[in-house]
């Protein structure tokens, strides 16, 4: 199965049906952002700390797998020159709709988050990557491509699922009121689920999901060359999953592309030779 093509069609369907992540921001929200009173989310509810962004005015920002007429237009209204790169044509169309409506500096490019060959090396100051790598089968090329296209001293802001979420069958938990470990990590719709559940996903046209462990998420960023400089957790909406009662379901990280000599000059204890 071509996962990229399948998930593209699934997200086009979801965008047409208008889920929470497919609702363009209003002209009023854009105007407020132009006035400097804005916030953005990498995860469902908690706003990204403003200091993670730095000064966006005039900066080249890549919104990676972030289409839908929400974050990319807000960052453009805040003063950045934004490129929205997404697998879904329908989600990109919503970014273009807001950009045209509100005269924003926003370009859209369709493609797979693991292949950023459309962009030159070191061309972005900041990458904004909200929860979406749950739809990528392999994270290593995603992090490597982010490192390649980011300028030195650039920032990668990422949101992703807490891998603990994928240990459970949430449909079953909703029926029984009991969370019981059922799957191992890393998780894959294609490998972890029964044939019946896989057939249901395809029949309903839902995107295929992959539950990556923390070594792939955080360790993968470090292996690609990034330095992790910030982290916070977030909860989902109460009705979304029983697990939300017990633990945050989302994680966000701030990573920077900085040189070894910059790390060495920081106030960090060096290991013994």
Image: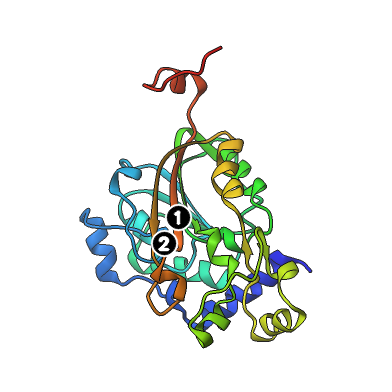
Front residue of 20/101: it is: 20
Front residue of 1/32: it is: 1
Q: Could you say which quadrant of the image residue 55 lies in?
A: top left
Q: Residue at x 42, y 20 (%)?
A: 269
Q: Residue at x 72, y 66 (%)?
A: 3
| Viewport quadrant of the C terminus | top right
Mark 1 surroundings within 10 Å by alpha-carbon count, few (fewer than 14), some (14 through 19), many (20 or more): many
Q: Residue at x 52, y 87 (%)?
A: 175
Task: State the image coordinates of residue 141 (x, y, percent, origin top left).
Answer: 66, 47
Residue linked to disc 1: 251
Indicate whether 17 appears above or below 29: below
Front residue of 245/27: it is: 245
Q: Residue at x 35, y 70 (%)?
A: 25
Task: State the image coordinates of residue 43 (x, y, percent, origin top left).
Answer: 42, 61
Whether the residues at callouts 1 and 2 have beta carbons within 8 Å, the answer is yes
Q: Residue 182 vs residue 235: left or right? A: right
Q: CA distance from mark 1 to mark 2?
A: 8 Å
What is the number of the mark on residue 248? 2
Q: Can residue 117 be seen from the camera position used here?
A: no
Q: Can residue 211 be seen from the camera position used here?
A: yes
Task: State the image coordinates of residue 256 (x, y, percent, origin top left).
Answer: 46, 36
Indicate whether 49 appears above or below 122: below
Q: Could you say which quadrant of the image residue 9 lies in?
A: bottom right
Task: State the image coordinates of residue 193 (x, y, percent, origin top left).
Answer: 71, 74
Front residue of 166/161: it is: 166
Q: Residue 25 vs residue 64: left or right? A: left
Indicate whether 261 appears above or below 111: above
Q: Secondary structure at mark 1?
A: strand
Mark 2 surroundings within 10 Å by alpha-carbon count, few (fewer than 14), some (14 through 19), many (20 or more): some
Of the residues tagged 1 and 2, which is closer to the observer?
2
């Amino acid at each position: 199965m071509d996962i990229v093509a399948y998930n593209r069609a699934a997200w086009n369907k979801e965008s047409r049906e208008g889920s929470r992540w497919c609702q363009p921001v209003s002209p009023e929200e854009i105007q407020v952002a132009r006035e400097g009173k804005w916030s953005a989310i990498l995860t469902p509810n908690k706003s990204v700390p403003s200091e993670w962004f730095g000064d966006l005015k005039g900066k080249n920002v890549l919104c990676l797998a972030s289409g839908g007429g929400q974050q990319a237009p807000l960052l453009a209204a805040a003063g950045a020159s934004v490129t929205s790169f997404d697998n879904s044509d329908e989600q990109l169309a919503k970014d273009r709709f807001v950009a045209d409506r509100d005269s924003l500096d926003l370009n859209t490019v369709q493609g797979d988050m693991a292949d950023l060959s459309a962009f030159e090396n070191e061309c972005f100051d900041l990458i904004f990557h909200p929860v979406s790598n749950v739809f990528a089968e392999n994270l290593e090329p995603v992090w490597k491509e982010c490192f390649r296209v980011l300028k030195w001293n650039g920032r990668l802001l990422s949101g992703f699922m807490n891998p603990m979420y994928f240990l459970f069958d949430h449909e079953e938990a909703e029926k029984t009121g009991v969370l019981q470990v059922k799957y191992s990590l890393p998780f894959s719709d294609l490998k972890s689920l029964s044939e019946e559940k896989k057939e249901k996903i395809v029949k309903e046209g839902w995107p295929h999901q992959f539950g990556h462990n923390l070594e792939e998420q955080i360790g993968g960023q470090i292996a690609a060359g990034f330095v992790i400089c910030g982290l916070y957790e977030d909860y989902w909406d109460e009705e979304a999953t029983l697990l939300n009662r017990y633990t945050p379901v989302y994680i966000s990280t701030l990573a920077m592309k900085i040189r070894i000599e910059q790390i060495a000059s920081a106030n960090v204890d060096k290991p013994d030779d």
